Image (cartoon, grey):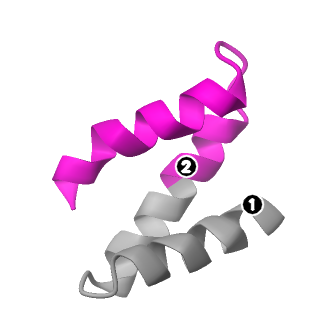
Amino acid sequence: MGYFLSALLIVALIFPEISWLSKISWSIILTLAEYQRFLDDNLAVPLVGILIKPLI
């Protein structure tokens, strides 16, 4: 829950022009990327963030 809230705060500060639905979706996807077991979270979260940025 803590990571989700911090990701939501960061995306709200970085992208204030996008809708709240997009902000929440972005935060959920990054939270799930942190808890996957295939890659270290220090690599997975930035990679997923870069990959989903064009979708917003």
Kindly identify which residue carries mark 1. Answer: 3
Vertical side of 25 occupied by 51: above or below = above
Q: Quadrant of the image for the C terminus? A: bottom left
C-alpha span from label 1 to label 2:
9 Å
* N-terminal-most mark, 1 or 2: 1
> Which contiguous range is marked in magenta?
29-56
Q: Which mark is residue 53?
A: none
Quarter of the figure with residue 26: bottom left
x%, y% of residue 30? 55, 49
Q: Residue at x 26, y 81 (%)?
A: 18
Q: Which quadrant is the N terminus positioned in?
A: bottom right
User: Which x, y percent locates residue 6?
Assistant: 69, 70
SS for callout 1: helix
Task: Give the secondary structure at mark 2.
Answer: helix
Residue 50 seen in the figure: yes
Question: What kind of residue is marked 1?
Answer: Tyr
Q: Nearer the viewer, residue 35 or 13?
A: 13
Q: How would you rate the neighbour count of disc 2 (Cα within 10 Å): few for under 14, some for 14-19, many for 20 or more?
A: many
The residue sitting at 33% across, 87% down in the picture is 16
Determine whether, in the image, residue 23 is placed left or right of residue 45: left
Tell me what residue is drawn at x 73 percent, y 18 percent: 37
The quadrant holding residue 36 is top right
Q: Is residue 56 above or below residue 48?
A: below
Marks 1 and 2 close (CB-CB < 8 Å): yes
Residue 36 falls inside the magenta stretch: yes
The image quarter containing residue 4 is: bottom right
Mark linked to residue 30: 2
Look at the image and say whether residue 7 sits in the magenta stretch.
no
2 with respect to 24 (left or right): right
Amino acid type, mark 2: Leu
Instruction: Please tell me whether residue 56 is drawn above or below residue 54 in the rendered image.
Output: below
